[in-house]
Amino acid sequence: AQSVTQPDIHITVSEGASLELRCNYSYGATPYLFWYVQSPGQGLQLLLKYFSGDTLVQGIKGFEAEFKRSQSSFNLRKPSVHWSDAAEYFCAVGDYKLSFGAGTTVTVRA
Amino acid sequence: GAVVSQHPSWVICKSGTSVKIECRSLDFQATTMFWYRQFPKQSLMLMATSNEGSKATYEQGVEKDKFLINHASLTLSTLTVTSAHPEDSSFYICSAGEPGQYEQYFGPGTRLTVT
């Protein structure tokens, strides 16, 4: 069975500081991994995805994620956070049906 | 990029009535669409997988007679919540995938409130 764990429910970060969101997955084969962002009352926007190849993936809005098979992790990072990055972030795994983590709420303080 | 729309974006209905939510892929053909439910401050829960021209596949615990899904064309899937009750109030999100692709494109969601 596939599953995703996002250990951090809520993270507060200062504007301009770096951000890292953790994601651990369980999957029987080579995983397809995704990071989505959701603003309040909105749908999901894809930040980046990993299917194969280079384990460091670049996404939109300055985000990147690194796939580490040995740690079953796919952590999301951003070097310098902007106030507009305040949102809910979901990690997902799957090749047909997606399983989502519980999400991490990011608050950005001035 | 691939765009998925949902209509309505929000709806209020009275207990006992039915409400239909539409999910459309605007610029691609979607052989598969997915319906999710999201409670406040929680993650997305997959309700069902909808394949064009065939019956939907429901996840365990989802009442198929309550949540009717129809995928009549390659660009439209509908979710009908029948005999709605206040506990059905939620945020419903659809997604669609292109044939042979693993990426899903998400709609903006529909907020359902049952009074």
Image (cartoon, rainbow, N blue to C red):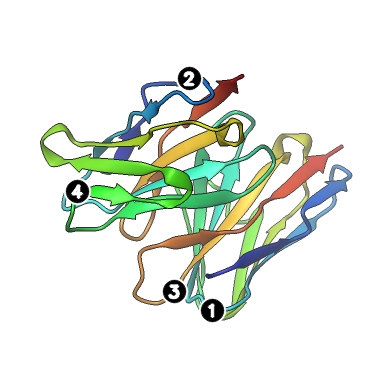
* Real-space CA distance between mark 4 and mark 2, rounded to the nearest whole angstrom: 25 Å
* Real-space CA distance between mark 2 and mark 3, rounded to the nearest whole angstrom: 34 Å
Say which residue appears at 45% left-offset and 61% top-offset: B104
- Give the SS element for disc 4: loop
* Real-space CA distance between mark 4 and mark 1, rounded to the nearest whole angstrom: 29 Å
Say which residue appears at 60% left-offset and 30% top-offset: A83
- Which residue is labeled 3 in the image? B98
Asked if badge 1 and badge 2 are on a common chain, one would say no
* Real-space CA distance between mark 3 and mark 1, rounded to the nearest whole angstrom: 7 Å
Q: Chain of mark 1?
A: B
Q: Please, what is the three-letter code of the amino acid marked with disc 3?
A: Glu
Asked if badge 4 and badge 1 are on a common chain, one would say no
The image's mark for residue B28 is: 1
Q: Quadrant of the C terminus of chain A?
A: top right
Against B53, residue A14 (above or below) is above
Q: Is residue B61 visible to us here?
A: no
